[in-house]
Amino acid sequence: MQGCAFVDGEFVAPEDAKISIFDWGFLHSDATYDVAHVWKGRFFRLDDHLDRFEASLKALRLDPGVSRQRMREVMHECVARAGLQDAYVEVLCTRGRPAPGSRDPRTCRNNFMAFAIPFVWIADPAKQQRGIDLIVSSTQRIPPASVDPRIKNYHWMDFVMGLFQAYERGGETVVLTDGQGHITEGPGFNVFAVFGSGASARVVTPAAGVLEGVTRRTVIEMAQAAGLVVEQRLLAVDELRRADEIFLSTSGGGVVPISHLDGLPVAGRRAGEFGPVSAQLQQRYWQLHEDPRLVEPVRGLTLD
């Protein structure tokens, strides 16, 4: 795989990036991470990702042992060493290994790592042109009272089981509910629904039980700048089924339109036909990658 990783203080090839099987990050999913992306040689909203990563570290009482500036340097160098103009860049921190025979997390030395690999799409451009098929799973999202979804984490077993259910029903990806009939989020994305059109259009996204995604924030800002009403609140499954447009927000592709929900076309449209709000926000999202206020050129990267 093309890419570069940073493990144990060294830059290594992706296939040489390894951790101990006794690291609690592996044994107990005791870790946090964040993913930024590079597009055309520039990081997008890197400070927002680092802000969230540092907040997650603090919430989980993890100490990466490096400064924010060093994190930024490592991310830049991973991309530059890999020679990637479009990249998926992850920083992570695991709990590490406890003292022999101990279950006391205070005895662990936390581990900071990072890697850059080619850009990862949740739905590639060709798939986005026709839209993707979303399934609402009967699998319940892990309750926020158990694992706070605002802390980016690897507790994905609910998502994995939901994905299997989606594939069995002919879908391509899945969104989970809170067990009380409300939409939460999917594996790596937030969900938006649009009701109405023109000046009266309302954009709704779940406000509880979700990661507050950086792309989600970008979409909210874009919609408000366009004069649209944005509602962050509970979104019932039945209400989602009545939406005029549905789309996802993700660092792995930006604004991704949904063509079918549970096998039925959204608002009766044919595949590849999307509402004006989804189309407008999708276009605007990629235009923002040219905004100097939001991008940061990768240091040491030679562009084609």
Image: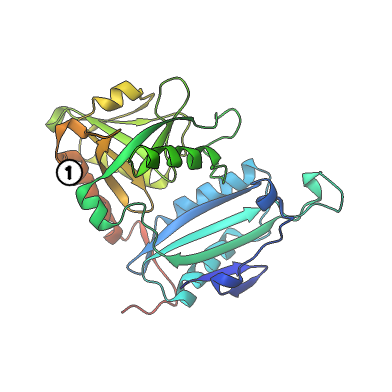
Q: In the rendered view, would you say 26 is above or below 3?
A: above
Give the tally of numbered discs: 1
The reply to whether residue 109 is in sight is: yes
Between residue 43 and residue 10, name the one nearer to us.
10
Between residue 179 and residue 301, name the one nearer to us.
179
Image coords of residue 104 (percent x, y): 81, 44
Q: Quadrant of residue 42?
A: bottom left
User: In the current view of this chain or complex, which residue is farthest to the front?
Assistant: 168
Estimate how packed mark 1 is, as few (under 14), some (14 to 19) or many (20 or more) residues with alpha carbons within 10 Å. Answer: some
Between residue 139 and residue 200, name the one nearer to us.
139
Q: Quadrant of the C terminus?
A: bottom left
Image coords of residue 245 (percent x, y): 22, 34
Residue at the disc numbered 1: 271
Q: Amino acid at mark 1?
A: Ala
Q: How is the image coloured?
A: rainbow
Image coords of residue 223 (percent x, y): 25, 39
Q: Secondary structure at mark 1?
A: loop
User: In the current view of this chain or complex, which residue is farthest to the right?
Assistant: 101
Image coords of residue 92 (percent x, y): 58, 56
Residue depicted at x 52% and y 37%: 158
Q: In the rendered view, would you say 68 is above or below 141?
A: below
Q: Quadrant of residue 132?
A: top left
Residue depicted at x 71% and y 50%: 24
Q: Along the horizontal axis of the image, is 275 left or right of 152?
A: left
